């Protein structure tokens, strides 16, 4: 069994086209039910301050506890959710869960913890997007300064017209914004300057795996660029001590990756936070 098997273990067999379509259809209807049947769950992954090893935040990542297939990762069902127009609702559900969990953590002593939530293009482009964010904050009583919205670099570019107004309105309220998967979306420096963002999240593809001169140069370059723009940086995909040392030596102070923790249910995440 190789490493590749593990990553692709959902596609061991290549079913006939009609069988695959049927499979997809049944997964679709199962997904529509999943939200109602409370089969979705939010997992949390630590975001760590490289200097002292302490978590400063968590990222909320959705999981689907499928009754037959077990815990499914977003790679399997997010595209499907998008196709059937369910993605924005799903994001909003995750947002509400994460804000409530964040408030609980604040009340139990983790009072500086920042909760990051992924926002899809579908959710972001809703006309009442800002109102829905405000509603989640009001309902949960989480202070806006402890919510961070992660928008991928690709979404940001596609929504360029819409984005400034919405980001500025979020910023005015003290909500943080990160550009996720940064380095994969080809945004230009001039565009970046227009986005009022707080953090660049360096895409994991530049960090995990074997170190290479090219990846190393990209990581260095993004860290420099962030300094110039006056925004902070988080390196994603830190899996080993060696990778941690590398990004630290390049001046990155924040990291997220399997080296610190995998995404886990809220109870397990809390245990880890208490131990660190
Ligand atoms: P992302 O927002 O960039 O989240 C980080 C992903 O990288 C997570 O995958 C996490 O498990 C994985 N990861 C973190 N550290 C490491 C590491 O050291 N090594 C490796 N190999 N992987 C690492 P996950 O949870 O499968 O999510 C994948 C993507 O799905 C996310 O990427 C995000 O774009 C999307 N996603 C997850 N939850 C949501 C959600 O609630 N709403 C939306 N719109 N998208 C979501
Ligand atoms: Mg993210
Ligand atoms: Mg993302
Ligand atoms: Mg990412």
Image (spheres, helix red, strand yellow):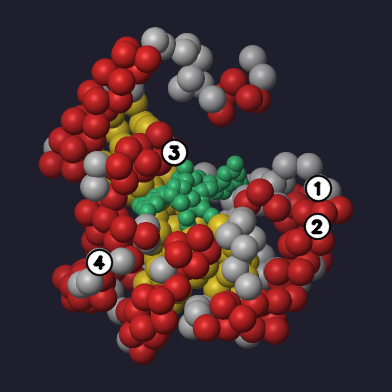
Task: Say which mark, if any, is on residue 216.
Answer: 2
Task: Say which mark, if any, is on residue 180.
Answer: none
N-terminal of the pair, mark 4 or mark 1, is 4
Quarter of the rendering containing residue 30: top left
Left or right? Give the position of 120 relative to 132: right
N-terminal of the pair, mark 2 or mark 1, is 1
Mark 2, other Cα within 10 Å: few <14 / some 14–19 / many ≥20: some
Q: Quadrant of the N terminus?
A: top right
Q: How far apart are marks 3 and 1 (CA)?
A: 25 Å
Residue occupying the far bottom of the picture: 172
Left or right? Give the position of 81 relative to 54: left
* x, y percent for residue 36: 13, 41
Q: Do the residues labelled 2 and 1 touch (CB within 8 Å)?
A: yes
Q: How far apart are marks 4 and 2 (CA)?
A: 37 Å
Q: In which quarter of the image is the C terminus?
A: bottom right
Q: Is mark 3 on a helix, strand or loop?
A: helix
N-terminal of the pair, mark 3 or mark 1, is 3
Q: Nearer the viewer, mark 4 or mark 1?
A: 4
Q: Name the residue beneath numbered marker 1.
A: 211
Label tally: 4
Q: Is mark 1 on a helix, strand or loop?
A: loop
Name the foreground residue: 169 vs 199. Answer: 169
In the image, the residue with mark 3 has its CB under 8 Å from the nearest atom of ligand 1: yes
Q: Do the residues labelled 4 and 2 touch (CB within 8 Å)?
A: no
Q: Name the residue beneath numbered marker 4.
A: 126
Q: Distance between the residues labelled 2 and 1?
A: 7 Å
Going 81% across and 61% down the picture, which residue do you hit? 217
Q: Distance between the residues labelled 4 and 1?
A: 40 Å
* x, y percent for residue 61: 40, 50
Q: Is residue 52 visible from the viewing direction of this image? A: no
Q: Nearer the viewer, mark 4 or mark 2?
A: 4
Q: Name the residue beneath numbered marker 3.
A: 75
């Amino acid at each position: 069994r190789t490493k590749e098997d593990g990553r692709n273990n959902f596609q061991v067999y290549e079913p006939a086209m009609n069988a695959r379509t049927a499979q997809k259809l049944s997964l679709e209807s199962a997904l529509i039910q999943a939200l109602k049947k409370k089969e979705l769950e939010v997992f949390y992954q630590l975001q760590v301050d490289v200097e002292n090893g302490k978590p400063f935040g968590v990222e909320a990542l959705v999981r689907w506890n499928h009754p037959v297939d077990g815990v499914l990762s977003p790679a399997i069902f997010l595209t499907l959710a998008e196709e059937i127009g369910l993605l924005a609702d799903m994001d909003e559900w995750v947002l509400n869960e994460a804000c409530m969990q964040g408030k609980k953590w604040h009340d139990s002593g983790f009072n500086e913890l920042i909760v990051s939530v992924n926002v899809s293009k579908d959710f972001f482009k809703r006309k009442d997007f800002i109102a829905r964010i405000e509603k989640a904050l009001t309902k949960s009583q989480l202070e806006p300064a402890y919510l961070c919205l992660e928008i991928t670099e690709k979404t940001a570019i596609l929504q360029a017209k819409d984005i400034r107004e919405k980001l500025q309105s979020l910023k005015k309220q003290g909500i943080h914004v990160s550009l996720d998967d940064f380095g994969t979306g080809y945004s230009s420096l001039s565009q970046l300057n227009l986005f009022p963002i707080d953090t660049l999240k360096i895409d994991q593809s530049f960090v995990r795996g074997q170190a290479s001169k090219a990846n190393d140069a990209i990581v260095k370059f993004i860290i420099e660029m962030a300094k110039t723009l006056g925004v902070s940086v988080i390196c994603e995909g830190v899996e080993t001590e060696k990778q941690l040392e590398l990004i630290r030596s390049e001046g990155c102070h924040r990291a997220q990756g399997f080296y610190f923790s995998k995404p886990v249910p809220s109870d397990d995440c809390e245990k880890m936070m208490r131990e660190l």
